[in-house]
Amino acid sequence: MSLADELIARAERRDVTFGIVGLGYVGLPLAVELARAGFRVLGYDISERVVNGLNGGHSHIKDVSDAEVKELREKNGFEATTDARRLTEADAISICVPTPLSKYKDPDVSFIVAATEAIKASLRPGQVIILESTTYPGTTREIMLPALESTGLKVGEDFFLAFSPERVDPGNVKYGTKNTPKVVGGITPDCHRVACAMYAPAIDTLVPVSTTEAAELVKLLENTFRSVNIGLVNEMAIVCDKLGVDVWEVIDAAATKPFGFMKFTPGPGLGGHCIPIDPHYLAWKMRGLNYKTRFIDLAGELNSEMPLFWVRKLMEDLNKHGKAIKDARVLVLGVAYKKDIDDLRESPALDILGLLHQYGADVTYHDPYVPSFSEADRDYVSVPLTAEALQAADAVFIITDHSNIDWELVRDNATLVVDTRHILGSVR
Ligand code: SAJ
C-alpha cells in the first residue's frame, strides 16, 4: 500500500490527527467540523490569549460558541498550543492565517511564510499540508513547496501539499464550513487525493480542480467578481446622481429580470477583509507578468471614490439648507463595514469620518455593534440613538444599515439625511 493510500485509509478510519494553524474565523470553525467528524484536532496559534481562551473553553469567534469549544475539548480532545514543535503530531495540517495587504497594496504573505517555516521545522513523512488562506496564484507551488522540499522530503511521495480556499462568510447563518462546497487542488494527483480524503468526513461537498493555481484563482475570481460588480453599481449611483434618477429604483427594476442579472447595491464604499483586498493579490501577480488587470484596478478606484462621493452629497445637501459642512453637526449611523456585524476592517466609515473631520464637521456616531473605537489618533464612542440626538443633528449620515437600528425613529426625527444604503427608502 502506498503512503497516499495508507493515509486515505486512516482518514476513513478517523485515525488521523488534524492540525489547524491559525485559530481565527476560518481555523476555529474548521476545527469544530473536523472534530465533529471524529478527528483528533490540535490547534496552533501564535496568540497566547487565543490559545489560553480556547483551552479554558472560551471562544473568541462569534460563529463558534463557548459551548462548542467545551464540546470540542471534552468530547473530541481538542487542544490548542503555541508550541509549533507539536505540529509533528499532526498527520494533516490546514493553514488558516491572515493574508493582508501591505501599506503599498502589495500582498503580505509573511504569515504564510511563518506558518510554512513552523511546519517545515517538524515536517515528517506522511504529513499532508493544505493552505486555506486567500493568496495569489502560485503561492503554494512557489513559496511553500521549495521550503518544505528543502528538508529533503519529496512532495507527492513523502509528504503531500494542496490548496483549498476558505469560503467562510462570518455571520452567515445559512452557509457554514460544513455545507459550503470546498474547492481542493493538489500539487500532484496523490496530493489531491489525500487532501480530499482528509476533508471528506467533515465537509459535505468537495470540488476537485487540477492544480493549486486553479484553486487559488477560484477564490480570487469569486471575490473579484463581487468587487467589480459592486464597482459597477457604485458607478451607476454616480451616473444616476448626475441624471437625477433614483439608482435604487433602477436596480430594483433591473433585478426583476429572472435571468442574466444579479443584484448588487451601491454603498458608502468597499469594506471587509476580503473583497477590498483579494483582487489586489491577483493584480499584483499579473503586474509581475507585465499584464495590467484593468477591471480589478478600475473597480478598486471606483469603490475607493465612494466615501468622497457621499461626503460631497452631504455638502450639497447642507448647502441647500443654507449650511456649510464646517461646524455642521453630523450624526453618523453605523460604522461597521456591513450590516449586523461589529467588524471595522477596511470599513468605508473610517474614510468618511476622516473626510468629515477634514472638512471641519462636528461628528458623532451611533453603532449598536461598535460601542467605541479609535482611528487616526481620534477616540470615538457610540452615542445613544434618541429623537433628541437626531433632531439636534444638522445632518444624519447613514453608512451601515444595521437591522437593529430604529429606522422609523430616524425617518421621523432627522431633518437632513444622506442615506448611502437606501435603508429609509425601504422603511414604510
Ligand atoms: N457591498 C456593497 N454592495 C453589495 C455587496 C456588498 O456595497 O452589493 C459592500 C459591503 O457593504 C461591504 C463590502 O462590499 O462593505 C463587502 O461585502 P460582502 O457582502 O462581499 O461581504 P464580505 O466582505 O464579508 O465578503 C464575504 C466573502 N467571503 C469570503 O471571502 C469567504 C465573499 O466571498 C462572500 O461572497 C461574501 O462574504 C458574502 O456573500 O456575504
Image (cartoon, rainbow, N blue to C red):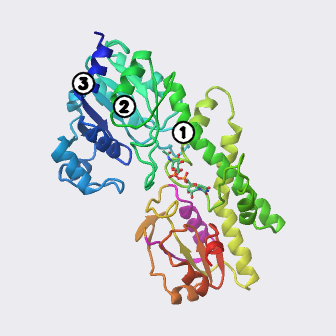
The residue tagged with tag 2: helix, strand or loop? Answer: loop
Q: Nearer the viewer, residue 271 or 222?
A: 222
- Residue 296, compared with residue 152, is above or below; it is below
Q: Give the residue number, with chain letter if any, for mark 3.
A: 122
Q: Are marks 2 and 3 in contact (CB under 8 Å)?
A: no
Q: Give the residue number, with chain letter if any, for mark 1.
A: 106
Could you give the CA–CA distance between mark 1 and mark 2, rounded to whole angstroms? 34 Å
Binning the other alpha carbons within 10 Å of mark 1 as few (below 14), some (14 to 19) or many (20 upward) gives some
Q: Nearer the viewer, mark 1 or mark 2?
A: 2
- Residue 251, compared with residue 357, is above or below; it is above
Could you give the CA–CA distance between mark 1 and mark 3, rounded to whole angstroms? 30 Å
Q: Residue at horizontal 63%, vertical 43%?
A: 225
Picture quadrant of residue 422: bottom right
Q: Per the image, is 202 magenta?
A: no
Binning the other alpha carbons within 10 Å of mark 2 as few (below 14), some (14 to 19) or many (20 upward) gives some
Left or right: 49, with 223 as reference point: left
Q: Residue at horizontal 72%, vertical 57%?
A: 256
- Residue 15, compared with residue 371, is above or below; it is above
Left or right: 416, with 12 as reference point: right
Picture quadrant of residue 284: top right
The residue tagged with tag 1: helix, strand or loop? Answer: loop
Q: Please state the extent of the stretch shown in magenta in the rendering.
A: 346-368
Q: Specify the amino acid type for callout 2.
A: Ala
Q: Earlier in the sequence, mark 1 or mark 2?
A: 1
Q: Which mark is residue 200?
A: 2
Image coords of residue 260 (percent x, y): 72, 45
